[in-house]
Image (cartoon, rainbow, N blue to C red):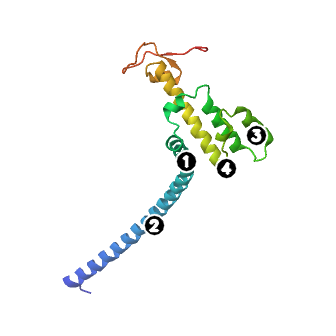
Amino acid sequence: MTINTQQLAALLKHADEILMCAEWHQLMSKARKDMDRARTTLAKAVRLLNENEQTEQAWLDVQAERRRQVEAEGWSPEHDDEHGGGQMARAGACYALAGSSAPNDEKAAMLVSLAWPWAPQWWKPTTARRDLVKAAALILAEIDRLDRATARQTDGCRKALLGWKCTRTAGHDGPCAAVQMQEGE
């Protein structure tokens, strides 16, 4: 059997098409596997995002409550600075206790009545989650107040906020010559 050039070219073209088709199927098979791996990874990412979203939402709610306290109630940092003696921390603890106990828990109610630092009309428990959000916002406000008080006492040295004692007498920008505070200081 003799094959002319035209027939040879047609056979080569057909063979090339078969090879391309095989390569295409091989690529598609690999692509399907890659897509399956990508779907699995994406599903894991979505699960993690959903888990983080719940935590993130809680933190966003605490921040929103703190903003509400400042904007709607007028409890600015300057106002908070007038409340020493851990009043905001105690109020936060009361809301945390309310958020963690059953509605008819008499012991919790008694503890709250003893620990609540302000007039009774300011005690406004609602739901467990809302009370915990209020608790976190109040505790955040107390931490901010403590940080501001420490910064004033140390002329703004940030290391003092972390339990260090600044050895300089005035505020500074450069490295701090702070030393770890000893117990009782």
Q: For the residues marked 4 and 1, what is the alpha-carbon distance in whole angstroms?
A: 14 Å
Q: Which residue is mark 2?
A: 32
Closer to the camera, 2 or 71?
71
User: Which is closer to the viewer, label 1 or label 3?
Assistant: 3
User: Which is closer to the viewer, label 2 or label 1?
Assistant: 1
Residue 129 to residue 88: above or below: below
- Residue at the image point whose x is 76% and y is 40% from the top: 109
Q: Which residue is mark 1?
A: 61
Q: For the residues marked 4 and 3, what is the alpha-carbon distance in whole angstroms?
A: 15 Å
Residue 87 to residue 66: above or below: above
**Label 2 or label 1, whichever comes before in sequence order:** 2
In the rendered structure, the answer to whether residue 25 lies left or right of residue 153 reads: left
User: Which is closer to the viewer, label 4 or label 2?
Assistant: 4
User: Given the image, on which type of amino acid does mark 1 rest?
Assistant: Asp
User: Which is closer to the viewer, label 2 or label 3?
Assistant: 3
Q: For the residues marked 1 and 3, what is the alpha-carbon distance in whole angstroms?
A: 25 Å
Q: Position of residue 59 (x, y in %)?
A: 54, 45
User: Given the image, on which type of amino acid does mark 3 rest?
Assistant: Ala
**Label 4 or label 3, whichever comes before in sequence order:** 3
**Label 2 or label 3, whichever comes before in sequence order:** 2
Q: Element at badge 2?
A: helix
| Mark identifier at residue 127 | 4
